[in-house]
Amino acid sequence: MLNFIEEIITHDIETGKHKTIITRFPPEPNGYLHIGHAKSICLNFGLGLEFHGKTNLRFDDTNPTKEDIEYVDSIKEDVKWLGFTWAEERYASDYFQKIYDLTVKLIKKGLAYIDDSTAEQIAAMKGTPILAGTDSPHRNRSIEENLRLFEEMKGGKHAEGALTLRAKIDMASPNMQMRDPLLYRIKFATHHQTGDKWCIYPMYDYAHPISDAIEHITHSLCTLEFEVHRPLYEWTIENLELFPSRQIEFARLNLTYTVMSKRKLLQLVQNKLVDGWDDPRMPTISGLRRRGYTASALREFASRIGIAKRENLIDVELLEFCLREDLNKTAHRLMAVLNPLKVVISGQLSVVGGQVQEENLSVQNFGLLLSTVEMENNPENEADGKRNIPFSNEIYIEREDFMEIPVKGYHRLVPGGYVRLKGAYIIRHEATLKDAEGNITEIHCKYIPESKSGNDQSGLKVKGVCHWVSIAHAVEAQCNLYDKLFTEKEPDSDKERPFTDFINPESLKILPKIYVEPSVKDLKPGTTVQFFRHGYFCVDKNSTSEHPVFNRTVTLKDLWKPGI
Ligand code: ATP
Ligand code: MG
């Protein structure tokens, strides 16, 4: 089924209004992109591909004091990483001269004037939604004077804030946006693209329709809050007699347990509440990437949430669901022990007719000092092959996998009990060693050679399976356990308290030393794997072979049921 934007485009093509379509993704380079932008990117580029049209990447860079080339670069990287290619890379600043020339035309038409009212005076004359505004005393300046002053503004002859250029529309319009909106302001700021060439900058609402029209954008998609700006968009295009780009609004993405505005995300970065824009807890595309999210999971998420005309709030669980689905297909399964308990395999047992025989072979005799076991890289994908994992008579298992006094329903190792070591052998508990305080320091077990996984001749049935690593071969790594950044579903919805009050103090737990099987040595930063029973983990960008670091991407538990 087509969404409402696809319907409009299909209609425009069928009726011959447009032969082909051009869309654009128009970020302001004033921060890093977040998952809401990913929705807009997937929508704009997706439509370009679907209708065999084009999509431009346009930087809406009309506010130099807030913008930076660092953001331009990160935006390009994120769009590429999401898997899209833009037809052209454009900047609103490419059009500053053209916008200036068009503005002269507008002034000549008597549709814009220079106002020397202060910002406060302009605000005071604006009126309210139910009360008409009042005309500025400068509203009826002559065209000649307006042209002269506008040129002087451009020439740097007036101070910042001294003069503005305003559209001459209607101070009584029921739409506040149409009450002589600001078109240009003076800013003595160095621009990341145009340097010091300009000291007047067009307002976003004015530059946007002109930029769209210059690029022959057929369908200009933006979020719902721009609906009230549409009349100004249309007014600009009509009065400047430009290509008839059409603005269409769709509902922005709102996600639970997060904030989604560059301004707020910047606040988190500046106040050092997170470790930069790409902190793995951030909803930024770069943060999600560092966390281990895949581009295909984000595209799938965008496709599942679809395009609506009404605001809604999406559960972050849906995002995690899309991620698990993807990683389940691609991530290699590895063994990592987060909370180690040493197990010494002190001997072997044999089985005759399903009965365990007691034998007392010394360590030297049982031949398990060093061997390997073979394990599938991903049971979901045979083509991923197998690998050998070193096994020895000293291994770590998780502390939680042994219980001296077991609780009801506990299926893992207990005194005298059996458990299978994943991909390896069945072992039986023999002895528990403790320190002076009574803490368990290690346990001793015997193994059953006939029970090797893949060729189990033992005839024994054991319920519990434990993952393990060989102590001598394990790689020591740091592990960052990430959780939700906020404790509230809608952290920015409280009128009394700032969203920063709801930061989850447990959102990062660092385990300085975990033990991982040696195959992780070859993993490159950015690779995501599954650690058995613990979840998916991504090799951090700062991970090295001397100091490997894993970020928990998402746990395995899946509470969310697909309903969308
Ligand atoms: P922010 O408030 O986070 O700064 P913005 O809308 O000001 O967002 P822009 O750089 O102007 O950021 O946005 C580029 C494009 O991405 C716009 O077309 C905008 O409508 C869209 N966009 C921004 N946030 C969302 C969102 N949460 N969901 C969908 N699209 C979004
Ligand atoms: Mg913005």
Image (cartoon, rainbow, N blue to C red):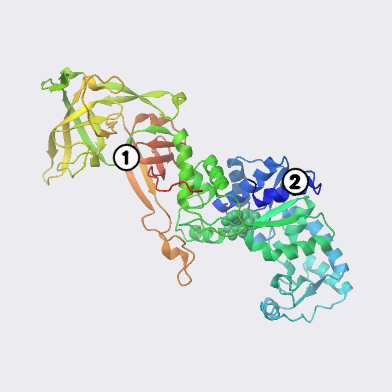
Q: Residues within 10 Å of mark 1 (few under 14, many from 20)?
A: some
Question: Three-letter amino acid code at disc 1?
Answer: Ile
Q: Which mark is residue 10?
A: none
- Say which of 461 and 317 sits in front: 461
Left or right: 564 as drawn, with respect to 476: right
Secondary structure of the residue carrying numbered label 2: loop
Give the residue pinned by disc 2.
Answer: 21
Residue 281 visible within the image: no
Give the residue pinned by disc 1.
Answer: 514
Left or right: 226 as drawn, with respect to 356: right
Q: Which of disc 2 and disc 1 is earlier in sequence?
A: 2
- Say which of 558 and 71 sits in front: 558
**Nearer the viewer's eye, disc 1 or disc 2?**
2
The quadrant where residue 148 appears: bottom right
- Say which of 397 and 423 sits in front: 423
User: Is 477 above or below relative to 388?
Assistant: below
Question: Three-letter amino acid code at disc 2?
Answer: Ile
Give the quadrant of ligand 2: bottom right
Q: Position of residue 191 (x, y in %)?
A: 69, 57
Left or right: 150 as drawn, with respect to 192: right
Q: Position of residue 167 (x, y in %)?
A: 78, 70
- Say which of 18 and 1 sits in front: 1
Check mark 2 vs ligand 1: CB closer than 8 Å? yes or no. no
User: Is 561 above or below relative to 228?
Assistant: above
Q: At 70% across and 59% down in the image, what residue appears?
A: 62
Check mark 1 vs ligand 1: CB closer than 8 Å? yes or no. no
Residue 563 visible within the image: yes
